[in-house]
Image (cartoon, rainbow, N blue to C red):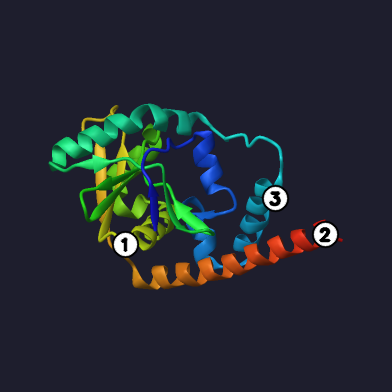
């Protein structure tokens, strides 16, 4: 494991570090290791070989998240009396890595979501049942890569009196094992594609 602390997430250096690597944002596809993984690997490898400048997708929810994430992180640190640190990218291997929102102390991590009102209200009503499974998979992959003992999921919306919902997630051995299988499967797919491209180039 190698931690890139000074790299800013979203920068060109960050994009270069992630290029050709499976990342935790696609952990649901990795964990199921089916057609979704094959589709993800092919798309990822196409982007890594393309000379086109990668355009980062954004939408209203993502822009709101960027604006509120620092605020949420500070509130979390103060309310819990902990030290949180930001890192750019954590490399698991030359084939995989993750970009956590924050690391917490020596043992934990933090995933922050800043949803719009109607989505946040679901967290207030249904609590952990409202957490999308793709976020659970993402956190499990973060736990696998970092070796941390726990990871807090935080939903934050300052429009509500109770502005944050926090749920602690521990390593799930079943999901971790599925992710290990998916990462090995994905690695083989990446190696196969690289070998095919190399063979085609020297023909």
Q: Nearer the viewer, residue 173 or 49?
A: 49
Can you say whether 67 is above or below 93 in the image? Answer: above
- First of labels 2, 1 by sequence position: 1
Q: Tell me the residue at 53%/70% (across/down).
A: 184
**Do the residues bearing badges 3 and 1 touch, measured as CB atoms within 8 Å?**
no
Mark 3 → mark 2, Cα distance in angstroms: 19 Å
Circle 2 crowding by C-alpha within 10 Å: few under 14, some 14–19, many from 20: few
Q: Residue 168 occupies which quadrant of the picture?
A: bottom left
Q: Outermost residue toward the left?
A: 81
Q: Residue 115 occupies which quadrant of the picture?
A: top left
- First of labels 3, 2 by sequence position: 3
Q: Residue 107, percent across and down?
A: 22, 56
Mark 2 → mark 1, Cα distance in angstroms: 41 Å
Instruction: State the mark number for residue 147.
Output: 1
> From this viewpoint, is residue 192 visible?
yes
Give the mark count: 3
Q: Tell me the residue at 46%/70% (across/down).
A: 180
Can you say whether 87 is above or below 195 in the image? Answer: above
Circle 1 crowding by C-alpha within 10 Å: few under 14, some 14–19, many from 20: few
- First of labels 3, 1 by sequence position: 3
Mark 3 lies on residue: 46
Q: Tell me the residue at 39%/73% (across/down).
A: 174
Q: Residue 133, percent across and down?
A: 43, 56
Mark 2 lies on residue: 202
**Do the residues bearing badges 2 and 1 touch, measured as CB atoms within 8 Å?**
no
Identify the secondary structure beneath mark 1.
loop
Instruction: State the mark number for residue 11.
Output: none
Q: Tell me the residue at 61%/69% (across/down).
A: 188
Answer left or right for 64 relative to 188: left
Identify the secondary structure beneath mark 2.
loop
């Amino acid at each position: 494991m190698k931690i890139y602390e000074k790299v800013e997430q979203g920068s060109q250096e960050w994009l270069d570090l992630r290029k050709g690597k499976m990342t935790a944002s696609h952990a649901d596809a990795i964990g199921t290791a089916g057609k979704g993984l094959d589709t993800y690997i092919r798309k990822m490898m196409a982007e890594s070989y393309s000379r086109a400048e990668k355009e980062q997708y954004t939408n209203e929810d993502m822009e709101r998240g960027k604006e509120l994430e620092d605020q949420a992180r500070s509130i979390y640190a103060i309310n819990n009396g902990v030290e949180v640190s930001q890192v750019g990218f954590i490399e698991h291997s030359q084939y995989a890595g993750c970009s956590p929102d924050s690391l917490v102390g020596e043992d934990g991590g933090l995933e922050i979501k800043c949803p719009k009102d109607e989505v946040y209200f679901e967290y207030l009503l249904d609590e952990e049942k409202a957490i999308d499974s793709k976020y659970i998979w993402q956190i499990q992959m973060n736990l696998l890569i970092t070796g941390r003992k726990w990871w807090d999921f935080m939903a934050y919306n300052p429009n509500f009196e109770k502005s944050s919902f926090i749920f602690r997630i521990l390593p799930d051995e079943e999901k971790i094992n599925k992710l290990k299988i998916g990462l090995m499967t994905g690695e083989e797919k990446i190696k196969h594609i690289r070998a095919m491209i190399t063979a085609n180039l020297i023909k």
